Image (cartoon, rainbow, N blue to C red):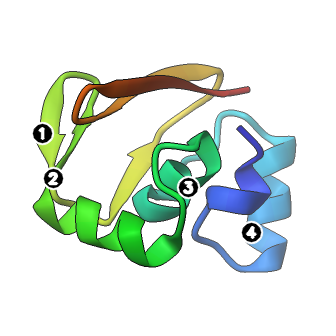
Amino acid sequence: VDLRQVAIADGASLEEAIRNPHLPVRINVAKLLVHLGLKSSRTEADRQVTAGVSIDGATSVSKQIDIESRPVRIAVRVGKRAKIAVFG
């Protein structure tokens, strides 16, 4: 997954986090759902996040998740559909 499309950060800190895989990155869950193709729009994805999204087997209603270091794989499930997001 391209961090530039789903990360919550300003330009400078995002570029630094992309270069250094040991820096934590905050991910927007709604953007991630759209990027993975689990939802077709940000509005639909925002509603789904409010209802709950399964992230690595645990249901979450948080609008963001923190990734402490990369590479990492995250299992994302919405209903019966599931995808694996790989952050490298």
> Badges 3 and 4: C-beta atoms under 8 Å apart?
no
Element carrying mark 1 = strand
Mark 3 lies on residue:
34
Sequence-wise, which precedes: disc 1 or disc 4?
A: 4
Image: 10 above or below 45: below
Element carrying mark 2 = loop
User: Mark 3 and mark 1: span between their CA atoms?
Assistant: 18 Å
Element carrying mark 3 = helix
| Residue 16 locus on image (x, y percent) | 82, 57
Sequence-wise, which precedes: disc 3 or disc 2?
A: 3
Q: Residue 59 carries which label?
A: 1
Sequence-wise, which precedes: disc 1 or disc 2?
A: 2
Q: Quadrant of residue 61?
A: bottom left
| Residue 50 locus on image (x, y percent) | 17, 68
Q: Nearer the viewer, residue 22 or 70?
A: 70
User: Mark 1 and mark 2: span between their CA atoms?
Assistant: 6 Å
